[in-house]
Image (cartoon, rainbow, N blue to C red):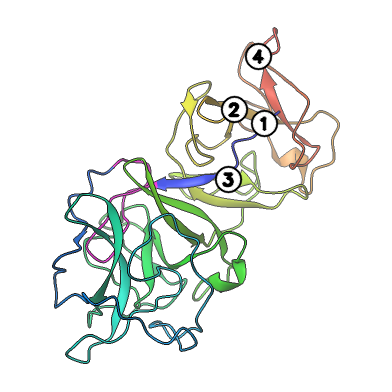
Amino acid sequence: MRLRRALALALSVGWLAGFAAVGCSSEGSDLADASAAPGGDAATDGSKADATSSRPDGSQAREGGCTAVKGPCDLVVQDCADDAKGRKQECVVARAPTGELTTQCVPVQPSQQLPMGRGCCPGSANPCLPGLTCVGDPCVDGGPVTGRCTPACCEGDDVSCGQSDPEGIGGQCDLSLFVESNEVHRVCSYRERCKPFGVEPCKQGQLCIVEDKVGTAGCIGSNNIQNRQPCQFANDCADGYICVGPAGAGICRMFCLTPNSNPPFDASAATGGPGRGGCPAGEACKGPGFQNLPDWLQLCELPDGG
């Protein structure tokens, strides 16, 4: 059984790479113009800072070259030199005059104060320290802070993600950001832990996704796609479902608690109803299981095995 493991966010982009809306496409009209960035003069000579120096956010330089969008500066390394006026700059995603996505050095703004892993509200202005982007669902008035300040990162380099502030949740470089259908770069997620089947649920609008063979599970924003509807990414489906199938042809299927199994939580806490360890009417908890997920996790299947 093939699991669609890639987590991806399709997002709108502010002029300082302020990725905002989970699960919606963007026309990219609010990207930086690579010929003239708001807030100051853009670097036009392609100058870069010493690759061995610290990044603008105070962390040490990292190995780059891994992002889908490339240009005069590197989004991971953050190798922008000071501009002609001596102002610190950061590397952001921009829209070139020809329409392609590229990178660009722009001056750091005084409002950029929040550290790596800190909660933030995505918007047109970036509240995070230079080199970081506020990634997550839009905040709702009176509701919780829904984003996190996260760096661009290279796949597999979880160390560069650090920990969330102040909770201390270890970051993972496992989210891909998209503008329209174009991948931009990877960023870190800082997922609060949960237990599936509603045993320890996530916040409203999130799903509890099982991540590995030992049953580690974390919360991530959901696009709320329902049972047996088409999906593309792991966070497309509503809580209690999982995106399975070949690339480009996934569907959301309800997952269930394998009968007589031994999960790492009190199985009696799951009610056995649909989404709580059981299956919808007409479906049964069967299937071959998953190679990289626990044996106690199965799929709900129709009588014909679909």
> Is 164 within the magenta?
no
Q: Circles 4 and 3: CB distance less than 8 Å?
A: no
Residue 18 visible in the shown view? no
* Number of the label disc, if any, that sits on residue 39: none
Residue lying at the far top of the rendered structure: 304
Q: Which residue is mark 2?
A: 246
Tell me residue 227's x, y (percent). 52, 23
Q: Give the residues drawn in magenta, as a range.
A: 10-25
Q: Which residue is mark 4?
A: 306
Query: Which amino acid, by three-letter code, is at mark 4?
Result: Gly
Q: Is residue 176 left or right of residue 38?
A: right
Q: Secondary structure at mark 1?
A: loop
First reached walking from the N terminus: tag 1 or tag 2 = 1
Q: Circles 1 and 2: CB distance less than 8 Å?
A: yes
Out of 74 and 29, give the one closest to the viewer.
Answer: 74
> Is 16 within the magenta?
yes
Query: Which amino acid, by three-letter code, is at mark 3?
Result: Cys
Q: Secondary structure at mark 3?
A: strand
Residue 123 visible in the shown view? yes
Q: Is residue 204 left or right of residue 202?
A: left
Cα separation between marks 1 and 2: 7 Å
Cα separation between marks 3 and 1: 19 Å
Q: Which residue is mark 3?
A: 208
